[in-house]
Amino acid sequence: MKICVISPFTGLAGDMLLAALVDAGAPLERIRSAVAASGLTGWELRVQSLLTHGLTAARALVDVTDDATSRPAAELIAMAGRVEPAPVAERSVAALRAIAEAEGRLHGEAPERVHLHELGGHDTLVDVIGVFAALDALEVSTVYCGALPLGGGTVRTAHGVLPCPAPATASLLKGARTVGSELTGETVTPTAAALLKAAGARFEPPPEFRLLATGYGAGTRSLPDRPNVAVVHLGETADAGTRELMVLETNLDDVTGEVLGHAVGELLAAGALDAWISPVTMKKGRPAHVLHVLAAPEHASRLGDLVLAETGSLGLRQYPVRRTALERETETVDVLGMPVRRKRGPHGAKPEHDDVVAAARELGLPARVVATIAAGR
């Protein structure tokens, strides 16, 4: 399992985290493509290298060619919802919705009616989508974060001068680990706080891991005695094949086999790690089926909604499980001139059924014969 460990040396902002992830190896083009899918126009994302207090770090810069400096939260959320892949859109929407809810509570407005000022420009959307696109590209499953240093003093906003941390930031950081800092001003931004919240960041020591890469992301503020950077460490945990997952289940006694089969296909296409159906006997001897879904925790809510929508069920069970997945690789073998893919693990190899069927039809042989040849038995 790949993890990201954030060390907020002088604090954290969305652009600092984005730059650090790029510095650690996140592909910039994947990030730009995800942001572009939102429909945002008039922007360009650049990441440049700079030297600060003897440390080389990356800085993310958004060049804007239009004058839209603020937008309604509902507009930003709708734009983030268009992004592909779905997990990036889901987390981006969650972060923006968290900001809207925090601002709504502070100003007595419904979240969908909140008009974001400093947070409604291009930077916020680029930072939010960009961070989650980077985490997705790096295949990060879990985010850990060190204690966030909170500065004192004040910050100037569209609503006037406010104490640090800004009220919206303080609201979004509920439950996070924080520590006082001698730095003054805004050391943690609302965008950074929302990113951590939507990422499900754990404010606890990470497990033992193998370090894969480190990235340094610089902020725009210059400090006299230290580099203003956030640091990310990418790692692979010692139990890389074991992962905490969720199982979703619902009993169905009034759904046809065609609908069940369609639901399984839709769930797999939507990101379920697996989906299957079991026959059962319910009360009063009624024959029925149980639809099971294996999902990553961050996708469980969305996939649960899909189960209910596709089946019409009135309820859903969910519980945590631990899955151990052995290392495997996909290779292609030649079967009498036909290519057949097969997965090879520590204890054997299994041909891909679709390739076996296609080769069997071309060769005029039974599928079981082609499968035997492809497996190398």
Image (cartoon, grey):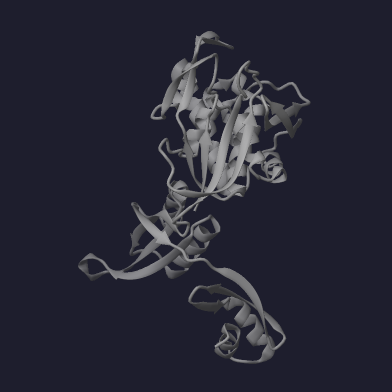
Q: Position of residue 322 (x, y in %)?
A: 38, 57
Q: Is residue 60 visible?
A: yes
Q: State the image coordinates of residue 354 (x, y, percent, origin top left).
A: 60, 76
Residue 187 position (above or below residue 146) = above
Whether residue 110 is visible here, answered yes or no, is: no
Residue positioned 46% across, 38% down in the render: 201
- At 70% from the left edge and 83% from the top edge, which residue is drawn? 338
Decide: is 8 above or below 36. above
Q: In the figure, 326 relative to 334: above or below?
A: above
| Furthest residue toward top | 161
> Which residue sits furthest right?
65
Foreground pick, 377 / 272: 377
Image location (x, y in percent) of residue 119:
60, 23
Of the 4 image quadrants, the one containing the C terminus is bottom right
Q: Residue at x 35, y 62 (%)?
A: 252
Nearer the observer, 189 or 287? 189
Which residue is most to the front? 54
Residue 332 percent across, percent down from the top left:
66, 76
State which quadrant residue 222 falls in.
Answer: top right
| 7 relative to 292 in the view: left or right | right
Location of residue 362 (image quadrant):
bottom right
